[in-house]
Amino acid sequence: MRLLVDVGNTALKVASEVNNNITIIEEGDINWSVVKEIAIAQVGPNKLLENVTTKAQQLSIPVRQAKVTCQLGAVKCAYPQFQNLGIDRWLGVVACHYLYPNKHCVVVDSGTASKVDVVTKAGEHLGGWILPGLDMMIESLVSNTQKVFSDSESLFLPELGRNTPNAVKNGALIATLGAVEAGIAQLNCDFEDIQVVFAGGYGELLQLHFEKPSVFIDDLVLKGLRNWCEFIHK
Ligand SMILES: Nc1ncnc2c1ncn2[C@@H]1O[C@H](COP(=O)(O)OP(=O)(O)OP(=O)(O)O)[C@@H](O)[C@H]1O
Ligand SMILES: CC(C)(CO)[C@@H](O)C(=O)NCCC(=O)O
Ligand SMILES: [K+]
């Protein structure tokens, strides 16, 4: 069994990979006796990884840290300084390209931060945008103003707000959905040729309010990590 680990800025996601099948598991439920290799995609702090790295050392399990390269298979990185691209973004792009090889993809991974990346069907990553995640947008508005406040009860809705929490929360939603539309516009082609892929903690909410066909893939970065492992083991 290969252990796949996605270290986000706030959340750790762990999965087992057996015969190409990825199963998301709780960190406490890892069956260490069958782990042959650990692959890690890390953008967040080492602290989130402490338990995994300690175990790996104790049991002498090989650990591989995925890194961005200028090219992986058919996928080419848009950043001239490819090392600066977040590995989560890179693996999201790689995963989408191999899941939808005949489509241009707009990859929307929204958690602590929101990332929108665009990759053509030829595998050319055109680049992307980093936005504050929805919570971060709200938090930065509330903490830098006198009269703006939010609440936990109000829903995120793609409509005009008529009270302060609705104005703030709906604004965060609309800004993020607007970036998705702008990503689509960058491709300058029929929507039929585009696959929009949502991922991350806010992915389902965004997909719910995005009015065109799209998919939500819970384990997108982990799928990209599996692709990365396939390439480096070749
Ligand atoms: N239903 C949900 N489940 C989990 N997280 C949610 C949910 N709805 C909203 N969130 C938000 O998504 C965040 C977790 O998302 P994700 O796992 O993508 O985070 P992350 O990987 O740490 O973020 P990033 O990749 O931006 O560093 C939480 O911090 C929370 O703000
Ligand atoms: C943007 C985040 C924080 C999102 O997790 C991550 O992808 C990251 O640390 N990126 C590095 C900067 C960049 O991608 O240009
Ligand atoms: K930083």
Image: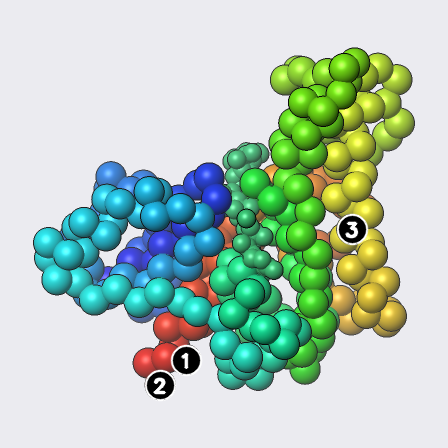
Residue at (64% x, 47% y) in the render: 114
Label 1, ligand 2: CB separation under 8 Å: no
Circle 3 sits on which residue?
Answer: 179
- Could you say which disc has been placed on residue 188 in the image? none
Tell me whether circle 1 and circle 2 mark residues in contact (CB < 8 Å). Answer: yes
Q: Residues within 10 Å of mark 2 (few under 14, many from 20)?
A: few
Disc 2 versus disc 3: distance between alpha carbons?
37 Å
Q: Is residue 203 visible in this depiction of the protein? A: no
Disc 1 versus disc 2: distance between alpha carbons?
5 Å
Amino acid of disc 3: Ala
On screen, residue 131 versus residue 223, left or right, reads right
- Toward the viewer: 69 or 151? 69
- Toward the viewer: 95 or 51? 51
On screen, residue 87 versus residue 191, left or right, reads left
- The image quadrant that residue 59 belongs to is bottom left
- Toward the viewer: 195 or 132? 132
Q: Position of residue 7 (x, y in %)?
A: 41, 50
Amino acid of disc 2: Lys
Circle 2 sits on which residue?
Answer: 234
Residue at (18% x, 56% y) in the render: 56
Circle 1 sits on which residue?
Answer: 231
Tell me whether circle 2 and circle 3 mark residues in contact (CB < 8 Å). Answer: no
Q: Earlier in the sequence, mark 2 or mark 3?
A: 3
Position of the N terminus, as image quadrant, is bottom left
Q: Residues within 10 Å of mark 3 (few under 14, many from 20)?
A: many
Residue at (48% x, 44% y) in the render: 9
Position of the C terminus, as image quadrant, is bottom left
Indicate the secondary structure of the residue bearing disc 2.
loop
